[in-house]
Image (tube, coloured by chain):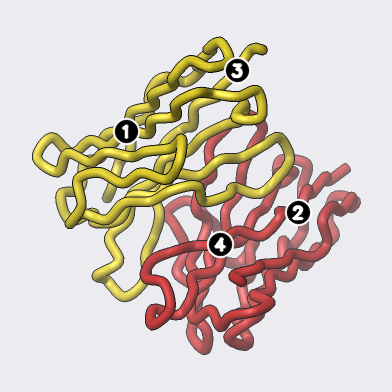
Chain colours: A yellow, B red
Amino acid sequence: GENVEQHPSTLSVQEGDSAVIKCTYSDSASNYFPWYKQELGKRPQLIIDIRSNVGEKKDQRIAVTLNKTAKHFSLHITETQPEDSAVYFCAASNGDSGYSTLTFGKGTMLLVSP
Amino acid sequence: GAVVSQHPSWVICKSGTSVKIECRSLDFQATTMFWYRQFPKQSLMLMATSNEGSKATYEQGVEKDKFLINHASLTLSTLTVTSAHPEDSSFYICSAERDRQGALYEQYFGPGTRLTVT
């Protein structure tokens, strides 16, 4: 089955700095890669996703890049703000089987200091 | 759009009792729903995949007789933790996949249910 590795496990940055979280996956058939933000005690919120036919996607301060050959994808957050502090999870799935089972990384706790 | 609700948001029960958790997609139909368990400071672990009108598919190591899943309609799936024990205490989160004609692959999560077994 799919295995997703995520690094780093914790990331501390100063407000205004950029933050990068990296994930690798093992199943070359995976074709959908979402990123979720989870605040303490709350539900994961989809913040951005990318499909295997695209190399990069950007939404304001958030961007995701995908390297299919190397089987890794990254989340980039620019101009970080304290409200960006949360746990971020990457995931991978292959929807061609009829539904999309997500395999999650272990998460990255991002701390943005004012 | 794409709102998923869960009920209850938290529950405390005594060891040996059963607890039912409901997951509803409020504004879309969900052929497939997923049940996850999340321990403190850990990732989401998929327990089972619930398909409307058919038996759930359980992940390896998850006891199907202990965690009963029923996906009765396109908007409702339930998880019943039977004969709960303290080690079942966890944060249970469901997600629903929107019909593929809408948004492919996207899963929307419920707010979670905090289960504490005493």
Question: Any mark on residue A112, and which?
Answer: 3
Query: How far is disc 3 from disc 2 in space, using C-alphas?
Result: 28 Å
Q: Secondary structure at mark 3?
A: strand
Side of A9 where B68 appears, left or right = right
| CB under 8 Å between discs 1 and 3 | no
| Tag 4: amino acid | Tyr
Question: Any mark on residue A74, and which?
Answer: 1
Query: How far is disc 4 from disc 3 in space, using C-alphas?
Result: 26 Å
The residue beneath circle 4 is: B108
Place residue A7 in its image quadrant.
top left
Q: Residues within 10 Å of mark 3 (few under 14, many from 20)?
A: many
Query: How far is disc 1 from disc 4 in space, using C-alphas?
Result: 21 Å
| Tag 2: amino acid | Thr
* Residue at (27, 37) in percent of width and height: A73
- Foreground label between 1 and 2: 1
* Residue at (37, 64) in percent of width and height: A100
Instruction: Tell if the residue under mark 1 belongs to the same chain as the one under mark 2.
Output: no
Place residue A15 in its image quadrant.
top right
Q: Residues within 10 Å of mark 4 (few under 14, many from 20)?
A: many
Q: Secondary structure at mark 4?
A: strand
Q: Earlier in the sequence, mark 4 or mark 2?
A: 4
Residue B52 percent location from the top left of the image: 52, 84
The residue beneath circle 2 is: B113
Query: How far is disc 1 from disc 2 in space, using C-alphas?
Result: 30 Å
- Is residue B75 positioned above or below B66 on the image? below
| Tag 1: amino acid | Ser
